[in-house]
Amino acid sequence: MTVNGNQAVYKAGDQVALKFFVASGFYLILVALVGVLMGIKIMNPDFLYNLRFDLLRPLHLQLMIFGWLSMVLMGAFYYIIPREVNKELFSPLMGNLHFILMHVGILGVGAHLILGYSSGREYLEPILLLDIAVVLVWVIFTANMFITTFKGDIQEGNLLRKPALNFMMLSVLYLGVNYLIGMVPLSGIRDGLAIWTFAHNAVNGWFMLGLMGVMYHIIPRLTGTLGAEPYHKKLTYIHFWSVVIFIPPSVLHHLLYDQAPINLFWKIAGEWTSVGMLLPTAIWVYIVASSFKNSKLVTGVVGQFFMAAMIFYALNCVQGSVQSIRAINSFVHGTQWIVGHAHLALVGWISFGIFGIVYYLVPRITGRNIYSDSLANTNLWLGVIGFVGMFIPLTIAGLIQGAAFSEGLSFFAAQQSIQSYMVMRAVAGVVYTLSAVVFAYNIYKSLSNEQVFVEPTTAARA
């Protein structure tokens, strides 16, 4: 059944989306708490001795990937893709099964990591049985999204003018194909390349492209600029095809260090395709900034989260391109600078965009206002303070470590010189955890808020 403007037809899919959003707050708190515990253990390894750092790190990462970020993105897809193709969700039953299996998978991964089981491959620690479960969940999700799209009321020419749909569907493919590549153990440098293909493209392929697709859908509606062509068509084409071209080879920038036994040609390819990522970065920043500049509506806290996300995105991409230059990479490789960069991507750019998505979509699903705008702003500023309070010490510590290593000092000597920055990092992590608690509480209370949601109509400018 084609929708033709009947919003009630979307209800079943919207309820699936809402479940993902509500669950995400719980996992965000877990991610933050494990992160704080790790920060404490860096300073005092004997604290809660049995919960070793080598057990907590993969748990922290897997909860971030599947519990927090993927939960929200998948929920957003259940809401947005049916609207992009003017068709109700193909199977709400598959959507609910997907939701249940996500929890089963996360519980299984978490339990086996805490018990000390691992495949021994960084970022891909889940054992084969759990890998198969992850792929099964992806197949259910992907089938639901693609069948909904193919059954939709959309012509080929119109499809080309839908950057939201193009980015979202590409990200779904990246999620699964990327995981399939990563889960197959290889030998030597080939295994390193497979591992980094997964790790890098989980961020650039799944999270980044997926978030961009969701924002392509939301921003014209948030700003009141939705029309026949809310975006410059040629720019969206260049944006899409430039990420398609640059993302795959840029994975090689993870193998730039001198000891990596790969041909210099491939190192140069990884180096300069990473620098080439500045092209889609500039285009995306321009598109979003122009949309907000021309806004006809007050964008509120959602707009503030999106703008914070874009600031962190621009900084993340510039930093990533710069540190992919071999001379710079050799200086910062293996330091806290890299940890800071990873947090800039996932905790800064992606997470702040995710916050904005939830605050935008939950009222439109429930028909109820967000419980407290004040709490939403508290969530924003505690998040900014907490994140910046982590990122700056990590960056400074990384530069100190790089200088120490270049002088021939040992890892332990370099580590002693950055202890004060690790204290700052842990304290900032506590602040970010408070932000996570505020977020989860605000969303939970919003479900029973008695204030009816009304689409904003207040002009942003006179």
Image (spheres, helix red, strand yellow):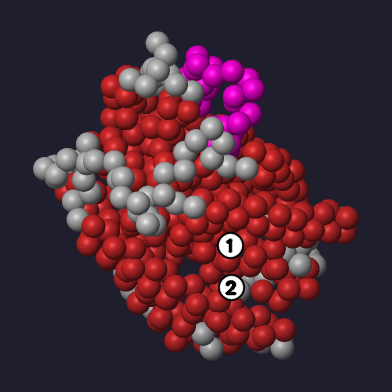
Whether residues under marks 1 and 2 lie with C-beta atoms below 8 angstroms apart, the answer is no
Q: Looking at the image, is 287 positioned above or below residue 313? A: above
* Prevailing SS of the magenta stretch: helix
Q: Which residue is mark 1?
A: 314
Q: Secondary structure at mark 2?
A: helix
Percent position of residue 55, x then y: 43, 58
Residue under the image location 55 percent in, 59 percent down = 313
Reply yes or no: does residue 230 show up in magenta.
no
Q: Which residue is mark 2?
A: 337
Percent position of residue 315, x then y: 58, 66
User: Which of these two is toward me, 412 or 403?
Assistant: 403
Q: Give, as a single range, the part of the protein colored magenta.
A: 139-168
Residue at the extreme top of the image, as rendered: 1
Left or right: residue 312 versus residue 234 is left
User: Which of these two is toward me, 41 or 237?
Assistant: 237
Q: Secondary structure at mark 1?
A: helix
Percent position of residue 336, x then y: 56, 73
Residue under the image location 47 percent in, 38 percent down = 226
Residue at the extreme left of the image, as rendered: 450
The answer to which image quadrant residue 166 occupies is: top right
- Which dot marks residue 370? none
User: Which of these two is toward me, 17 or 65?
Assistant: 17
Name the kind of residue labelled 2 in the image. Answer: Trp
User: Which of these two is toward me, 411 or 442?
Assistant: 442
Packing grade of label 2 (10 A; few <14, some 14-19, many >=20) is many
Q: Earlier in the sequence, mark 1 or mark 2?
A: 1
Quadrant (top left, top right, bottom left, bottom right) of the N terminus: top left
